[in-house]
């Protein structure tokens, strides 16, 4: 059974696209334009036994910047300093 679920509710497609991920694989989704992209990654932190996420800008087609925008614990308001993530 999948641990993570992703969807694209609004796009040029006629139906909603979906994706699934497991604790061992995580799930990364990406939305892009010619100016750059944004990725959201969900993953399971084995050491702390919790789901965590990272939101970052990434380059796309040679354009844009790469930097972490936010990191935290899924389902809580807790945040972690990006320097804590390796």
Image (spheres, rainbow, N blue to C red):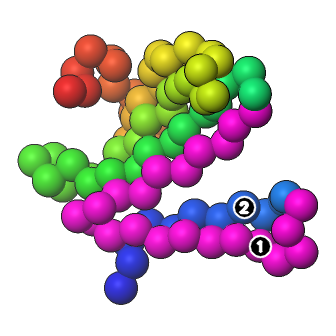
Do we see residue 58 in this rendering?
A: yes
Residue 21 forms part of the magenta stretch: yes
Which image quarter: residue 76?
Answer: top left
Q: Position of residue 45 (x, y in %)?
A: 21, 49
The residue tagged with tag 2: helix, strand or loop? strand
Q: Does 31 lie within the magenta span?
A: yes
* 10 or 75: nearer the viewer: 10
Camera-side residue: 28 or 61?
A: 61
According to the image, label 2 marks what residue?
A: 8
Q: Position of residue 54 (x, y in %)?
A: 43, 35
Please indicate, yes or no, whether residue 74 appears anywhere in the rendered image: no
* Rendered residue at 54%/70% (across/down): 19
Which residue, as the protein is rendered here, is positioned at the far bottom? 1
Q: Is residue 26 above or below residue 59?
A: below
Q: Which label was assigned to residue 59? A: none
Label 1 environment density (alpha carbons within 10 Å; few <14, some 14–19, many ≥20) = few
Residue 13 appears in which quarter of the rendering?
A: bottom right
Task: Say whether residue 6 is left or right of residue 34.
Answer: left
- Where is residue 29? Give x, y as percent: 55, 50
How many marks the image carries: the answer is: 2
Quadrant assignment, res 49: bottom left
Q: CA distance from mark 1 to mark 2?
A: 6 Å
Say if mark 1 contacts mark 2, CB within 8 Å: yes
Residue range corresponding to the magenta coloring: 12-33
Q: Quadrant of the N terminus?
A: bottom left
x, y percent for residue 66 = 49, 18
Q: Quadrant of the C terminus?
A: top left
Residue at the spot of label 1: 16
């Amino acid at each position: 059974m999948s641990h993570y679920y992703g969807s694209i509710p609004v796009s040029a497609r006629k139906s909603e696209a979906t994706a699934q991920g497991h604790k061992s694989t995580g799930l990364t989704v990406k939305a892009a334009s010619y100016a750059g992209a944004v990725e959201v990654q969900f993953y399971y932190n084995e050491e702390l036994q919790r789901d965590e996420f990272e939101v970052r800008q990434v380059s796309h087609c040679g354009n844009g910047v790469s930097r972490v925008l936010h990191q935290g614990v899924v389902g809580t308001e807790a945040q972690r300093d990006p320097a804590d993530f390796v």
